Amino acid sequence: MSRGDATDSDESVDYTDTELMITRAAQELRNDDTVLVGVGVPNLACNLAKRTHAPDLQMIYESGTVDSNPDALPLSIGDPVLATGARSIVPMYEGFSRYLQGGRVDVGFLGGAQIDKRGNINSTAIGDYGDPTVRLPGSGGACEISSNAHRTLIIAPHQKRRFPESVDFVTSPGYLDGEESREDLGLRGGPEAVITDKAVMKFDDDGELYVETLHPGVTREEVQAATGWEIRFADDVTATPTPDADEIRLIREELDPDGVYTGGGD
């Protein structure tokens, strides 16, 4: 869905919801960050950041490639293109033990079927665990990422079924019952932002989500209607910065020219 246009100098730029999510996620990344990343939107966000404001960003993929610089879009974490220009290729075990559990990963990207108001993620089961309505794929490496990365970024469509007040099952811990409960368990870091197709949300000092920015054309009422609890808005809530012409060119011409993850392409 096209959300309108961004302005780069005098040039009007059309963009989609997905492209806005990619560019906003990229802005959360800092130069010199080490990021544990998968495919899809997180991969596009990391590669966009590396080509713009964070040239020294280092990407680690779950398959074990360290400091990858893929020259084409990877279609899975096992895609051989991830070995392109990589500093090293290690067993998956070492990627999780030495790098992630060892505290060497700054940022992890996550998503899930449910995300609650404290950033807890469910990718295990909808409904009762013993007799679920839907059995989901499970954690994979998500629990390890959420427990050990210094910051986690969550990307998901903004739908009421995805944002209940409390998840049915905590697959990947956010701030649990509050920020102190995470610290009590000895977990590193915590979720830093939730980026959706409607808004960017951050966490307050007690580990509860609030809306920091609204995407252009999105109202508070739309966000509230798509959220399963009475969500708070920042006192100075502003519009989410929109993509510029160079970011859109990089996404469409270099990072995902066939629209595999953005839905564009020729």
Image (cartoon, rainbow, N blue to C red):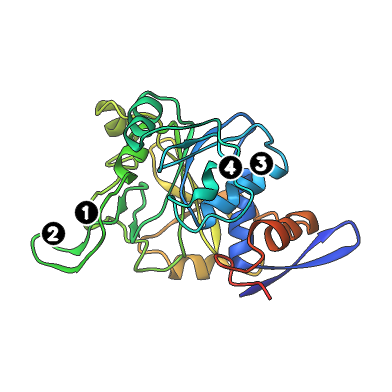
Can residue 56 be seen?
yes
Mark-to-mark CA distance, 4 and 1: 38 Å
Quarter holding the N terminus? bottom right
Secondary structure under the numbered disc 3 in the rendered image: helix
Of badges 2 and 3, the one in the foreground is: 3
Report the residue marked by disc 3: 50
Mark-to-mark CA distance, 2 and 3: 40 Å
Exactly how many numbered labels are in the figure?
4
Q: Earlier in the sequence, mark 4 or mark 1?
A: 4
Q: Position of residue 235 (x, y in %)?
A: 58, 48
Of badges 1 and 3, the one in the foreground is: 3
Q: Earlier in the sequence, mark 2 or mark 3?
A: 3
Would you say the residues marked 1 and 2 are in contact, meaning their CB atoms lie under 8 Å apart? yes
Report the residue marked by disc 2: 129
Which of the two residues, 228 or 104, is positioned nearer the viewer here?
Answer: 104
Q: Is residue 63 above or below residue 10?
A: above
Residue type of the residue flagged with mark 2: Tyr
Would you say the residues marked 4 and 1 are in contact, meaning their CB atoms lie under 8 Å apart? no
Q: Residue at x 39, y 40 (%)?
A: 207
Residue type of the residue flagged with mark 3: Lys
In the rendered view, does 240 fall on the left or right side of 211? right
